[in-house]
Image: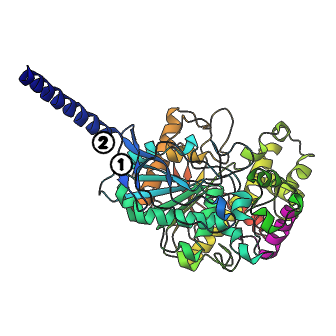
Amino acid sequence: MIEETTRRSAMLGLAAAALTSTALAKPQRTAPVVATTHGRVRGARHDGVLVFKGVRYGADTSPRRFQPPTAPQPWSDIRDALAFGPGSPQRGQGADGPTAEDCLFLNIWTPGADHARRPVMVYIHGGAYSAGSGSSPLYEGTRLATRGDVVVVTLNHRLGALGYLSLGRLDARFADSGNVGQIDLVLALRWVRDNIAAFGGDPGRVMVFGQSGGGAKIATLMAMPAARGLFHRAATMSGQQVTASGPLNAERRARTFLEALKATPEQLATLPVERLVEAMAVRDPILPSGSLYFGPVMDDRSLTRHPFWPDAPPQSAGIPMIIGNTRDETRAFLGGDERNHHLTWDELPARLGPELRVDISPETVVAEYCALYPDWTPSRVFFAASTASRSWRAAVIEAEARARQGSPAFVYQLDWQAPNGAGAPHTLDIPLVFGTLDAPGSITGVAPDARAVSDRMQDAFIAFARQGRPDHPGLPAWTPYDLADRQTMIFDTTPLLAADPRGKERELFARVPYIQPGT
């Protein structure tokens, strides 16, 4: 009896061991674990890629508000990386999830945590410098990682007053406060350099790309000494930063913010974060309208020059660059006002003037557009001229600066029109580049023409990440922008490399100085 009991116990033990072995093996197949320089993280498998969400790259910033970030404390256990980390506190709902000052997290999509040394594509989100996060469904990296056999990274960093309130001239203890949001990005890129090989990426082939504010942040990084060597290609999508805020304007904004809260810089460092978020709505003391502007500051510390003035930053001369815009940028900002779609010629000049963002007679602009495009409606002129004088003008300035420097800039214009009369507005290129055509927030639809344009744009960005050039068989030969031909890839149903598209519009607005909004 004892012998039988012993035998049964042994059999049960073997069965339990087998079950335990199977149970342990299964998580290894479905829940990959990767060791980082700070500790191990456990991700998940999804649609053929490994996904790690909410991986900490920096310590909680709340105890060191307005100070540069620090690396996280190491951990000895295995931490789950299965959910996005919080976004930076901000006004509105742009974070696509919860927010907290403890927001220095990144997300990784990779075909394999192996030694394949794949190109790395680090996406920096838009939302100017005050909103957004790396967890938008539009930035979901599965399709891009799968299509290109690349590693995709998105991230969060400090925004608004927490990332760009320049208190240094008022309190030396906060000397870096005007750029800590940018310094967060530097820390994230250092994390990528030190850890991405464990996720199957190549730390020597890191591409940063970003749309709108993300592109502007990248243009700024290109001039920051601390970012030197941390990325090897750069792509900006409808986002430029020609000049940063000067220190005196940044100080005026800081004083306005402090007055709204009736606080000193020292008190500001410990106020509830909710009060800081509320105060971000105060009217800007410099811009003609809108809430307080936050952005990078030329503080002679982390940023010692303007990003693209008076020339392209020499430290980034060897980094190939993509500079892109959409044909109808301002439809995203101004298209929601139904009046702008039904303008008369009499109404147009007064309506257009405030939206040009440069000091030029709107009557002159209207007359020039009527001569160039006699069959256009007043509303079409409104959207085209406001686009050409704003973000597109800054893109041209950056492309010209790169051409003068002899550094490659591959320029594109997205002409493909979204369905339902939406045109080619700001943000349209995001789902096209990520392949997230059916994600919430996308206006592309999933028709064959949308998929074809998306395939070409994805392949261009993947090729750029891999080889430093966006050429691929689905496009005409794409040569860098020069001042003679101003080569621009037109992304449309049929792609075309055009010479100086909208050249007369470019010449019109080149007659007056361009001042970066916010500076």
> Is residue 336 left or right of 123 when viewed as pictured?
right
Q: Which residues are magenta?
A: 240-258
Above-or-below relation of 78 to 176: above
Above-or-below relation of 94 to 280: above
The three-letter code of the residue at mark 2 reads: Gln
Look at the image and tell me in which quarter the C terminus lies: bottom right
Q: Residues within 10 Å of mark 2 (few under 14, many from 20)?
A: few
> Is residue 348 among the parts visible in the rendering?
yes
Q: Secondary structure at mark 2?
A: helix
Residue that carries the numbered disc 1 in the rendered image: 33
Q: Secondary structure at mark 1?
A: strand
Number of numbered markers:
2
Q: Nearer the viewer, residue 412 or 335?
A: 335
Look at the image and tell me in which quarter the N terminus lies: top left
> Is residue 220 left or right of 285 when viewed as pictured?
left
Q: What is the number of the mark on residue 115?
A: none
Q: Nearer the viewer, residue 236 or 115?
A: 115
Residues at marks 1 and 2, CA–CA distance in whole angstroms: 8 Å
The three-letter code of the residue at mark 1 reads: Val
> Per the image, is 294 magenta?
no
Above-or-below relation of 176 to 13: below
| Prevailing SS of the magenta stretch | helix
Q: Position of residue 106 (x, y in %)?
A: 51, 53
Above-or-below relation of 241 to 442: below
Q: Position of residue 140 (x, y in %)?
A: 51, 43
Q: What kind of colouring is applied to the model shown?
A: rainbow
Q: Position of residue 453 (x, y in %)?
A: 51, 43
Q: Residues within 10 Å of mark 1 (few under 14, many from 20)?
A: many
The residue located at (61%, 45%) in the rendering is: 428
Residue that carries the numbered disc 2 in the rendered image: 28
Q: Position of residue 127 (x, y in %)?
A: 68, 52
**Disc 1, disc 2: CB below 8 Å?**
yes
